[in-house]
Image (cartoon, rainbow, N blue to C red):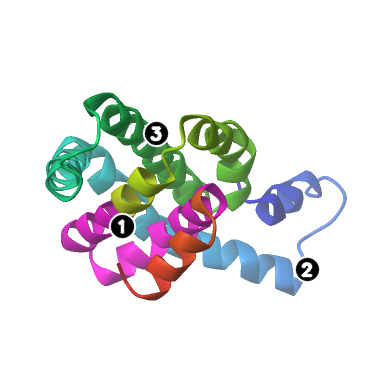
Amino acid sequence: MHPQIESIFDEAENRYLKPEELSTLGQYVDSLPERLETYRIIRDRELDIMQAVADQLQIELPNEKVEVLERSIKNALLTLRYCAMGMLLNDEALVKERLISWLSQTIKVYNTQVVDSTLHRLLNQQLSQVLTPKQVMLINTTLNSAQDALLGQETLTASALGW
């Protein structure tokens, strides 16, 4: 859960919520139905989304080894799942704490930055086709943060260009 909201609940035994805390909680509660719907769509369409990305990835990188593509696709799938949960809970820290540290090392060790950059661009494109603009905005909060942390400036530029 989002750290600010979690801290609000921790204080419940000591006092009532301050107006700004109540506003933060209200914003979270108001956005929860859209977050739930976005999460459900990603969960239910995960196979279709990732298959389309994998197919296009093979077209764009025909000379890349199958093992490298498979590893990057599995990593992107994990990233999508963590980002969806982070989006649902409105907690970017979840992605950073549980995914980024070990996955960024894997990308460096296997030297898959080019493949991963292409893959994440394709994933963003596919999500834009499956989700509404508002839902894309919700998932992009965590997804762009994860992609930026994993791939560095390449992804930032791709995100800024809408790739």
Q: Position of residue 75 (x, y in %)?
A: 39, 33
Q: Quadrant of the C terminus?
A: bottom left
Give the camera-side residue of 22 and 109: 109
Q: Nearer the viewer, residue 2 or 78?
A: 78
Residue 88 versus residue 162 in the image, above or below: above
Q: Residue at x 27, y 71 (%)?
A: 133
The residue singled out by tag 2 in the image is: 18
Whether tag 2 and tag 1 are in contact, CB under 8 A, the answer is no
| Disc 1: which residue | 121
Residue 157: give its label: none
Task: State the quadrant of the N terminus.
Answer: top right
In the structure shown, which secondary structural element does the residue marked by tag 3 occupy? helix
107 on left or right of 97? left
Counting residues from the start of the chain, the first of labels 2 and 3 encountered is 2
Residue at image location 32% in from the left, 63% down from the top: 136
Instruction: Give coordinates of residue 50: x percent, y percent.
Output: 21, 40
Whole-percent x and y of residue 18? 78, 68
Contact, mark 1 vs mark 3 (Cβ under 8 Å): no
The magenta stretch spans residue 132: yes
Give the extent of the magenta segment: 121-150
- Residue bearing the label numbered 3: 75
